[in-house]
Each structure stands twice: as C-alpha cells, then as structure tokens.
Amino acid sequence: MPTAWLTCPAYPPRDTALANLAVRRAQDLCAALDLDLRCSPLLSLGSGLRAHPLELRRQDLATWPQHGLIIALRGGYGCIHLAEELTAVAASLPPLVGFSDLTVVHAARLRAGRSDGVHGAMPGVDHGAQAATTLLALLRGQHLVYGPAQAPQAQVLIPGRASGPLVPACLRVLTGLVGTPLMPDLRGCILAVEDIDERGYELDRDLQQLHLAGCLIGVAGLIFGIFPGPEHAGPTPREVATTWAARLAVPALAGLPFGHDPDPLALPVGGPAVLDLRGQDWSLGFPQRPPLVPGIH
C-alpha cells in the first residue's frame, strides 16, 4: 500500500488539539484513497509561530521520496529556508498537497519538471466539503469543471479562452522567489494568484515586481482569488485585479475561492487546464489523467 507523509516544513501545529485534528483529517483522506498515513516527528509542537530547527526539517525533507504523497499540515513560514535542498531534490519529490507557504515547494517541483501537485486544503486548516471533494477528485485524476455553481461570486474581467498548465500560488510567496532558482517559468501558463491579509497596494506591488522581473511575459491567462483581509482606503484587491487583467490583456477571472478561503477549490499545480470566459459565463476545466499516486483508487 502506498504511504502518505503528514509533515510541516513551515509552521508546526500551534497546540495538541490542532495536531490531533489534523491527523484525523489526514487519516480520512488517506482512507478514501487507500493510502497508509505516516506522521512526521515535526508534528510535535513548536514554540509559537516559529518553524522547527532547520536541520530537523532538512532531515524530514530527505525522507519525502520514500512516500507516495506528501501532505502539509499547514502553511505559515519557513519553506524558503529549504531552498537549496529543494533545488537539489525537487525532481525526486512525490506529489504534494498544500498551499500558502507551500508555494515554495510547488515552485521547486515545477522548475524540476513535475506537474502533479495540488494547491488544496491542508488538514491543519479548517475547510468545507467542497475543499475535501475537489481535493479527492484531483488526487484521483478525475475530470473536473468549475463554474458559477462552485464560485457564484467570481467575475469575468477579460473574456476569452486560455489553455495551458495551471500555476496556482500564494502571491506574496511567489514574488519572494523572483531571482531565485525556484521561480517557475510562467510562459504559456494560466497563473492563479491568491493571498490573505494583503492590502490592495501590496498586491499591486507584488504584481509590479513580477512584471518588472519579466515573470509575467507570455502568461496565457489570469485567475485571481478572494484576497480576504483588512479594509483599506486605497485600491481594493478587485480593482487591482481589474487593472492587471487589462494591462496584460489576457483572459482573466477574479474571485475564485481557492487557497486562503473557508472552502477552497483544489487546483492542480502544473496540470493542464482550460479557462473559458464568455461574457459572465465561465468555466475552468481539468481533463482526466492518471491518479497522482499510483495504486490509489
């Protein structure tokens, strides 16, 4: 039976109750997939909002290739500390489930030619039924199509049709990879960005940096998340998204619930996608492909 490794290369669980809840959720996911769950020693409690010592996380990363699936317990901060190790071993790492700070690991795997990760719900973060069902479907390689029924608040900014690999990412984390060996090539990709607790001008600053660094050249389409966070007198996240959609002049959708959302849709990392935006009707589809972990059902 393939194994899944529950770990936390970013922040560890904040308390025992969260750690236990995360293990139960991961067990439910693995039971549905016929995977044997194994738990990393990193699930032990840390000291507040701090990652475990780097050497412990390096040792943990070295065990990842032994498993069929890696499940991040939560995000936070700390994956960037593993940049050198990730650059060296990314091609050998199994599929990863995670978002937020796990954007670092997804990016490293993309740079190494891997396209089988999932930007989806983590067991240490509360989520709803939609998050769980779409995560299972993507791990099984099932055909999926999202539309207004799954995201009634989404808005078409620029109509059109785009196809290519989907690259979902936490915007602030992705921007922090500019100039590093982990920054993925976005040419021909549909870029989906989301974040939390970022004001509109901060989102614009990140997009400006990606643009000035040449990272947005050749992007085939844009998807913006919900961007929950504090109100601010400056431009709203939706206004920033509208400006950048017009600036890049590619098919663009705003308000897709993924990542930092109470019930986030799971998105494939690097997997093929079709974004079809017609007026205010829209769809985001992923074709059927083999299960991400051989042997799961």
Image (cartoon, grey):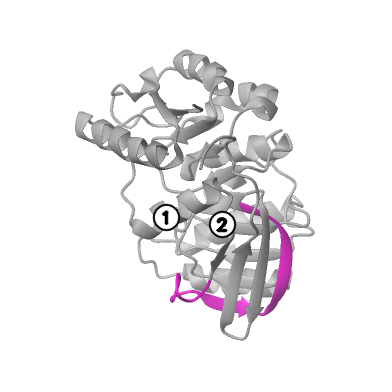
Mark 2 vs mark 1, foreground winner is 1
177 to the left or right of 78: right
Mark 1 Cα within 10 Å, few/some/many (few <14, many 20+)?
Answer: few
Q: Residue furthest bottom?
A: 279
Q: Nearer the viewer, residue 253 or 7?
A: 7
Residue highlighted by disc 1: 133
On residue 24, the disc is none
Q: Nearer the viewer, residue 77 or 155?
A: 155
Q: Quadrant of residue 178?
A: top right
Residue highlighted by disc 2: 193
| Amino acid beneath label 2 | Val
Q: Which residues are magenta?
A: 147-167
Badge 2 element: strand
Q: Quadrant of residue 144?
A: bottom right
Residue 250 visible in the picture: no
Residue pictured at 73% horizontal, 73% vertical: 249
Number of marks in picture: 2
Q: Position of residue 260 (x, y in %)?
A: 41, 54
Question: Image height check: is 162 above or below 118?
Answer: below
Q: Nearer the viewer, residue 202 or 112?
A: 112
Residue pictured at 42% horizontal, 17% vertical: 53
> Label 2, label 1: how many angstroms apart (C-alpha)?
21 Å
Q: Earlier in the sequence, mark 2 or mark 1?
A: 1
Q: Residue furthest left?
A: 17
| Amino acid beneath label 1 | Thr
Badge 1 element: helix
Residue pictured at 77% horizontal, 52% vertical: 214
